[in-house]
Amino acid sequence: MTPDRLAAWREALQEARFRGVLTVKAGDKSVTYRSDAELAAAIAAVEVELAQTSGRRRPRFLATTAAKGL
């Protein structure tokens, strides 16, 4: 799959997720996901594939939190 098509599919997935819709249609493809978690996993998979096809590494984020427990 070309980087342009992957980017278009990622945009469609993200737009559907932000709208709260589980059915995504991009071009002639239509996919219905069972949950938001499954949709998020699809977005992550497309981002990995897009990074690999464009020669970039996927950015990694590390978030830490701390609380005093008061």
Image (cartoon, helix red, strand yellow):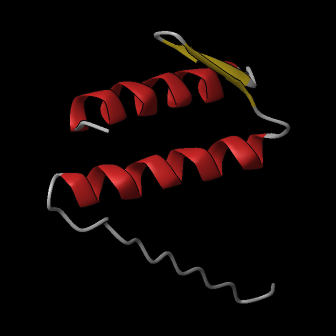
In the image, residue 2 above or below residue 65: above
**Residue at the outermost top position:** 28
Q: Where is residue 56 in the image (x, y as percent from the top left)?
A: 17, 62
Q: Quadrant of the C terminus?
A: bottom right
Residue at horizontal 26%, vertical 60%?
52
Residue at horizontal 45%, vertical 77%?
62
Q: In this view, does 32 lie to the left or right of 63?
A: right
19, 24: nearer the viewer: 24
68, 24: nearer the viewer: 24
Q: In this view, does 70 lie to the left or right of 15?
A: right
Q: In which quarter of the image is the N terminus?
A: top left
On the image, which quarter does residue 30 sit in? top right
In the image, residue 30 above or below residue 50: above
Q: Where is residue 16 in the image (x, y as percent from the top left)?
A: 61, 22
Number of numbered labels in the structure image? 0
Residue at horizontal 37%, vertical 72%?
60
Q: Position of residue 61 (x, y in %)?
A: 40, 71
In the image, residue 5 above or below residue 64: above
Q: Where is residue 12 in the image (x, y as percent from the top left)?
A: 49, 22
On the image, which quarter does residue 3 sit in? top left
Q: In this view, does 33 lie to the left or right of 53?
A: right
**Residue at the outermost left position:** 55
**Residue at the outermost bottom position:** 68
